[in-house]
Amino acid sequence: MQQTRQGSLKQLITAQFVNNPQEWLEMNISTSGLLNLTIVSNRFVGLSIPQRKEQVLSFLDQSQVPHFSPGFFSLYTLQEAESLNISRPQVINEASIYTWQDLAISAANPQNLSQAQVREPRVPRTVTFYSFKGGVGRTTALTHVAWILAMRGRKVVAVDLDLEAPGLSTALNLNPQPKYGIVDYFYERSYLPEGSSPSISVSQIFGEVRIPNATGRLFVVPAGDLNLDYLSKVDDLRATTIIGSGDNLWSVFSSEIIEQLKPDILLVDSRTGINQWGAFSLLQAADEVIIFLFPNEQNRQGIDLLLQSLQVLKNLSINFVFTPVPDVTEVGMAKVRKIWKSLYEKINKITYENDERNEDETYSSGLDLDEPQSEVADPLVVPYLSPIALAENYPVPALVDYYTRIANFIDEETDDLQRRTVLSSTDNRWEIIENLQFPEVNAADPRQNLSLLFQRTTDFERFLDDTTCLIRGRKGTGKTALYWLLLQHSEVAQKLARGRLDNTVCFSSHGRFYESRPSRDEFRVIHRSLQEGGSWEAFWRGYLLLRAFQEEHFSFPRGQQGKKFSDFKEIINNLSKERWQYEHTQALVQLSTEPRLQLIVKDAIDIINEKARKQSQIIWFLYDDLDEDLPEEGEVRQQALTGLFQFVQSCDARRLTAIRFKIFLREDIWNRLSFDNKSHFNGRDILLQWTRIDFLRLALRQAIQSTKFKNLVDRFSPVESIDQASEEAIDRALELLWGSRRRRGDKAKYVSRWVYERLTDSSSTTFPRSLSILLQGAKEQELSYRGQTSIKSPTDRLLRGKSLEIGLKKASEERCSAIKEEYPNLSRFFDSLKDVSALLSKEELQTIWRESAQDVISSFDNFAIFLSEIGLAEWREKEQRYKFADIYVYGFEMIRKGTV
């Protein structure tokens, strides 16, 4: 890189000739590439001028760093420098660059630039519209963008600094025109006698463009009245003028116009090309520049030169608009993209080299290994528009949409700057962080306001389908939340279903909604009894009837029809609702094993179905906690679940259309279940998986339970409806919490993607509970930095990358505890993963399996399939290795280095 080459050369010469604090060196490269040196050193004592020069040239020839052609060499001893009053040069800083010459010299000599901190962004921002050549629609674009921003509620000040060819006020049809313009304002202040006050105030040089129905305002500062006096003043004005107060012309004007109007944004129409007012607009006025160019070689060469110069300005944001593009077909756009890609790479290189963010604000390298590189963003393009070319005034309402992307970009940057201003207020930032809370959904708690926390996912519509009877998913994906939603929060469920549950009645056939239910011990007893006679299908049928009777949704028929139910009535009539007892188990065994009672139970269920059908009702019978209550040993779980699904099939066969089932079951249990006609449930099941947009919606829903954070979102990134909002809108709101979608430079990192992927296992299952733990852990870590003045706090978000990393580790620890509890027989295997690479060859994993899990799963192939099913690890064909999911790597203390 150029800076390294020049800096290295300066360091070599300094090391050779500067040996104490009194000695010094100034090195400048001319814009034509000549090396100019001033060296004050006692190395020259006793040497003539030619000898000194020969000594320096000999050293340069012997140095390993490529050097420049020699220019002027001024070589002095300390005594000579003192007698001639030669002093050290001042360090160049950005504030001293006023002209193109200043810029060119600074670009040629990056080694002389000040390393002082980059200034804080100015509020409001000034955006300069610039073009290297004319006729590209720069002024036209500014008028349309200013109009769009005013329509959106922004207070906009548009300034005409195209002083040699003004026309902004005419283009915007400003009427009436102000008495004076910015040329009069600048001229008076340039030649004002010391001690005198100006007669032209800033309030006399702008007018307002009235826009019907606009919620914002548009003010225009014209160049001035075009007459002979204007010509004289423009020719006499110097853009580099420093007035008596020591301020330049722009700083005086901007401070006064901001004080007068309190605008949200200033838009500057710059002079075209390389001239003093173009430099003024870019180097003194601009916080951001939008460069307009026609997609041809002339413009590209000019912009290349501009970028080569502007790289020394750390504070200047640069963007491009191609206009007017005559051919927007694929062929024409290929030419645009070729130029754009070249410019984009140069801009990203400049941005990356100038990036001075605090190290604590970025993620550790270990967390970014899987992140994809960003693609080149689409260029901003405005096609050739004949109505624009023929129009006398702007904007042209029918063509405003062509300029919306430019306005969107400015709008987003303005919001970003405003929120940085809010978050950079130390006290305000810590108050918001302290107020953060990330409550988990606990549908079993009747006190929780589920309407605020429950996230309606893309699976929810399919879940509501009456024919959907099997809800599969990993533990922790929300199956139980759906179960409790229907039973404990029926009003919320009705609202979320948007009318689809109006005629639906929900009962818990098995699950924790009732404390009175059979436990593992009871199921073992029932299993032994059924082996002697009866069936699990008959058991589930009798169990359902018992629940319906206890919920008073079944009553015994009267008269002659009811006589056949007398034995059944005697069995269940006196059973307690409060607690599951011996009598309950014996009753169900009796209903499941005696042939006559089995037939009577079928008839009773027919009665339930018919009653519901006549009342235009659908009854949903819900089953949850089957994995916990059905013991795995002795085939209990396998046979019990087989019987349950056979019961569902028999109800379908009997056309019991008013009776429907919702069975919540762990995915791995379903996969290992084997029974006849299992395919009957294809298309009648759903696999609960959180898409990224659903997951991010949940994150925002949790975060806005904090009042202060919600106020922040409402102010800068309002989301009217979380369920209806786009992923981009959700992302924008969450940036306030955890940062931008990308880091600076050409390797963009999307924080929302990072969070989602790190909380997703190898089977593409994402865990909502892990999100709450990650965010809570990140909050606690962030608060630990409070009061540590040596650690810089980010100004664009509340939670820095390091805090998110710590939160991820806590989420991973919880997830690892959950999977160990879920599969206790594999505890030795889980423990053996400590200090093991998260990317293992087949042989390495086989070794671990033999030592810790072969006695549990005897076949390695089955073991590998099992790891994939439970989302712990997956086979990577490209690397020929097993990769363990990040959500488990940190909790099991595995070594992540080398994973990709």
Image: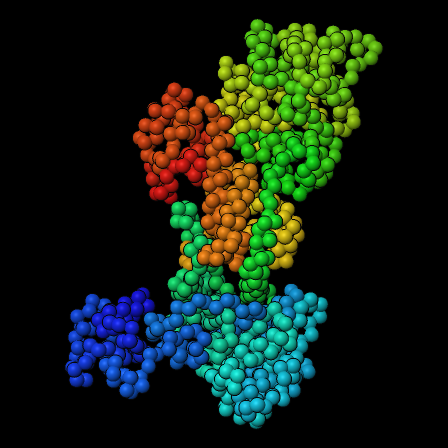
Percent position (x, y) of residue 855?
A: 38, 20
Q: Depth check: give the residue in front, 697 or 296.
A: 697
* Residue at 83% over, 10% down: 559
Q: Position of residue 365 (x, y in %)?
A: 39, 49
Tell me the colour scheme of the image. rainbow
Residue 543 picture quarter: top right
Q: Is residue 112 left or right of residue 285?
A: left
- Residue 665 in the image: state x and y as whole percent: 56, 27
Q: Is residue 505 above or below residue 736?
A: above
Image height check: is 194 above or below 2? below
* Picture quarter with the C terminus: top left
Viewer can see residue 598: no
The residue most toward the right is 559
Rendered position, 736 above or below 203: above
Q: Is residue 424 visible?
A: yes
Question: At 30% from the left edge and 69% from the top edge, which residue is drawn?
Answer: 7
Residue 867 at x, y = what percent?
Answer: 43, 30
Front one among 721 and 425: 425
Q: Which residue is located at x 63 percent, y 84 percent?
A: 201
Horizontal side of 415 relative to 497 (left or right) equals left
**Which quarter of the figure is the N terminus placed in?**
bottom left
Q: Residue at x 59, y 32 (%)?
A: 479
